[in-house]
Amino acid sequence: MTIQRFVPAFAGALVLLSAALAWFVAPTFLLIAVFVGANLLQSAFTRWCLLARILRRLGVREEASAWT
């Protein structure tokens, strides 16, 4: 899986987890969803994402070429 596919998948998983925790445990877990949404919005404008940077350092590959 490439970085460009992992980041939104991870964000979606965190939002779903946040919603489930807010429903079953405490509404304050919605702050996780707020943080994820703010980070996605920020990265759309600045083109910088901490998770992508961490994944690059861990050796996850960038977007595959059109021929792969």
Image: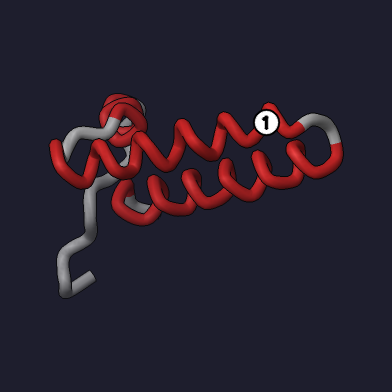
Residue 38 lies in quadrant: top left
Q: Residue at x 57, y 45 (%)?
A: 15
Residue 30 lies in quadrant: top right
Write down the residue under mark 1.
Answer: 29
16 horizontally vs 10: left or right: right
The one nearer the camera, 14 or 7, is 14
> Which residue is most to the right?
24
> Which residue is most to the front?
27
Q: Mark 1 Cα within 10 Å, few/some/many (few <14, many 20+)?
A: some
* Image vertical order of residue 60 relative to residue 16, above or below: above
Q: Position of residue 64 (x, y in %)?
A: 22, 60
Q: Position of residue 26 (x, y in %)?
A: 79, 30
Q: Position of residue 57 (x, y in %)?
A: 28, 25
Q: Residue at x 52, y 51 (%)?
A: 12
The one nearer the camera, 58 or 16, is 16
Q: Residue at x 47, y 45 (%)?
A: 11
Figure quadrant of the N terminus: bottom left
- Mark 1 residue type: Phe
The one nearer the camera, 8 or 21, is 21
Figure quadrant of the C terminus: bottom left
Q: Residue at x 19, y 34 (%)?
A: 48
Secondary structure at badge 1 equals helix
Q: Position of residue 2 (x, y in %)?
A: 33, 52
